[in-house]
Each structure stands twice: as structure tokens, then as C-alpha cells.
Image: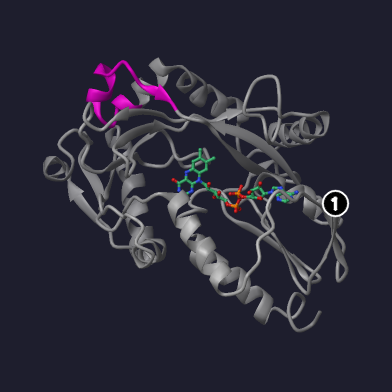
Amino acid sequence: MELKNLAKKYDVLVKNVGKVVVTKNTEEVARLETLFHRGIENGVDVELLSEEKLKGFEPLAQTSEKFLWSPTTAISSPAAIIKALEQHFLALGGKIQFDTEIDLIELKGEVIEKNGKFRSKYYINAAGAHADLIAKGLGIAKDFAMIPFMGQYRTIPQGSLPLKTLVYPVPHPINPFLGVHLTLTTDGLVKIGPTALPILGREQYSALSGWNIRDIVQSLSGVQSIAVGKSHSLLEIVKSEFPNLRLKGLKKEGGTLVPQVLQIKNWARKAPGIRAQLVHLPTGSLEQDFKVITHGNSIHVLNAVSPGWTSALPFARYIVGQILFTKEVGHGS
Ligand SMILES: Cc1cc2nc3c(=O)[nH]c(=O)nc-3n(C[C@H](O)[C@H](O)[C@H](O)COP(=O)(O)OP(=O)(O)OC[C@H]3O[C@@H](n4cnc5c(N)ncnc54)[C@H](O)[C@@H]3O)c2cc1C
């Protein structure tokens, strides 16, 4: 909601399209109901409705018994919102330095970067897929390893698949990925995906580049701990996600939500994204929530997985609150 209001404030296009969460079979109904109750407990505007009503919200979708309707879900352009935020920040006197790789934070001292040094009162490490490396440089986050997963979407013009709303499956109870879903973009595309393929490197956008031995060794320690732990089966995750790498598998999965997906042939590939999945080494479990570690005058945002974008503003406020009100990071430092 906050991001939506911000977009409106900066005249960035926002479309209120809503979202339905549908079930693939009757076994998923109990999980849908749990999701509904969790939404209500958290003050989210959601409705649990019966199957007969679905056609009124999304004529192309199907469900078993019930579905969830989220009337406040909206779409916008993340790039346009970031641009607006940048302008606002600069207008307030903020400075942004692009193309500058941070190597290490020295507490209460200087941030070392490739071509010089920065000095700061507080450090917020929000380096995404690299955040754990910066934290480890300070001797913290030793209990975690990062396994990168590539997520790919495919697109089709909305004219070929005239969806009115976003269509999501009920999230898997253990698998940390959202599952293949159908979304809309403000420039008139329908997206199907994402895939979730474990890869070798944090920047591996193609088969031959973007990986290194350090990333592989790290990932292997994560894989090993998952194999020993009882929380997740990486094999099961890979087995369920692997078919989606081929268009046929992706369509089959999407077709369980919107059967018309199966008829469409010419889906275009979109540039992939990389999801950095944090593994807790002592238990071998995949972290499914944000992980924030404070240390001296630094805060480390690890595992900012989806909905990291949607929740970016309240989450940023939470981080700033840590600086202002936590003794270790704030006044105590
Ligand atoms: C396929 C996919 C689909 C997603 N869909 C959604 C969605 O629908 N809704 C949603 O809410 N979220 C979604 N997410 C999740 C969302 O993208 C993340 O939660 C969010 O990007 C995390 O933000 P971040 O700032 O922590 O990290 P990032 O967005 O990864 O930003 C980290 C930044 O730090 C920079 N950096 C890294 N290392 C260094 C260094 N050493 N020095 C300097 N800079 C560095 C990087 O270049 C990057 O600019 C999706 C993610 C993926 C992969």
C-alpha cells in the first residue's frame, strides 16, 4: 500500500488490478484458509470467496472450492518508482555514488572500496546477493551460506491472454519459492514464472560467466547442510522446479491456474533475476524470512527475498528505527 501511495505521489502509473490466489485441488483449500486467516491477522484487505464467484473476478482462472481475492494489489514500474525516489533523495541533499564496489566495512572506521575510502557513522549493508560476504568480512553471519537461484519469466502481450487480474497459486508449505504465477505489467504484458534453478554464481546470468570457486564452495556447504538437516529436501525442490525450465513445464504449471496458457505458443523470454537464498548451516534450513543482523555500528540485511520490493518502504523504516533506537547500532556506538 505504501509503495502504491508513493508511486501516485510521484505521478508514476499505478494500475489497481487486484489478485486472486487459487487452489489446484481440494487438498490445498486448508492451506488457502490458513493464508486468509494470516492475512486478516496482519490487517490485509482479503476476502475468501467460493469457486462460483471466481468468474466475476478473473474469467480465465480456475480453482477448487475457494479462492482468495486481494482487492488492493496493484502493478507499477519498479524502475520508474526507483527513479522518482532517487530524484526525491537528491532534492533533499542526499548523495548517491554509482559503480562503486564495497569490499569491506571496518567498524567505526572506513568502508573500503576499490578506489578509495568512505567514512560513516552507521553502515547499512543491503548488498543483496553479496550481503553475506560483506557481513562475513566483519566476522559475523558465519552460520549462513548463500545458494543462488536463477528466476526466469516469459511474457506474452496481454491481447493474447486477456487476464484482468494477477493469478497466484497457494504457496507451498515448505518450498521457499512462490510457485509459478501469472502477473501483468503496466506496459501490457502477461508474465509467467518464475523458474527456480540453483546456479553456481551470484552473478551467473549465463552458463559460462558470473561464477567463481568461492561461490561454489559456499553453495556446497549450504547444500551439504541441507542434505544433513531435516528441514528441506533440495532434491525435492529441484525435482519440482526442474520441469519448469522448459516452456512445456512452465505452461503446464501455469495451465493449472489459467487453462488458456496451454494454448499459447509464442512466449518470449525475459532477462532472468537471481534470488539469493540464505541457508542456516547448523539446521540445514532455508531461511524464509528477512534476516537482519546488527553488529557494532553496522546493520546487515541478509535474505531480503520476495516481497522485498513490495515491502521496501516499511522495511526501510524498520531498519532506520534500528539505528535510532537500538543501543548497539545507534546511540551506544
Ligand atoms: C525473479 C525474482 C522475482 C521477484 N519478484 C518479486 C515481486 O514480485 N515482489 C517483491 O516484492 N519482490 C520480488 N522479488 C524480490 C526482490 O527483488 C528482492 O526482495 C529485493 O530486490 C531485495 O532488495 P535488496 O535491496 O536487499 O537487494 P538487491 O535488489 O539485490 O540490491 C542490492 C544492490 O547492492 C549492490 N551490491 C552488491 N554487492 C555490492 C558491493 N560489494 N558493493 C556495492 N554494491 C553492491 C547490487 O549491485 C545491487 O544494486 C523478486 C526477486 C526475484 C529474483
Q: Position of residue 22 (x, y in %)?
A: 28, 40
Location of residue 135 with respect to 2 vertically, above or below: above
Left or right: where does residue 175 sit relative to residue 278?
left
Location of residue 84 with respect to 194 vertically, above or below: below
Per the rendered image, the range of residues in magenta is 254-269
Q: Position of residue 123 (x, y in %)?
A: 75, 66
- Identified by mark 1, the residue type is Asn
Q: Quadrant of residue 24?
A: top left
Residue lying at 45% horizontally and 50% vertically, measured from the top left: 78
Total numbered labels: 1
Left or right: where does residue 216 sit relative to residue 21?
right
The outermost residue toward the bottom is: 331
State the residue in front, 283 or 136: 136
Q: Position of residue 219 (x, y in %)?
A: 74, 34
Q: Can residue 233 be seen by looking at this rendering?
A: yes
Location of residue 130 with respect to 84 vertically, above or below: above
Residue at the spot of label 1: 115
State the residue in front, 206 or 72: 206
Magenta region includes residue 259: yes
Say few, some or many: other residues with alpha carbon within 10 Å of mark 1 (under 14 / 14 to 19 / 20 or more).
few
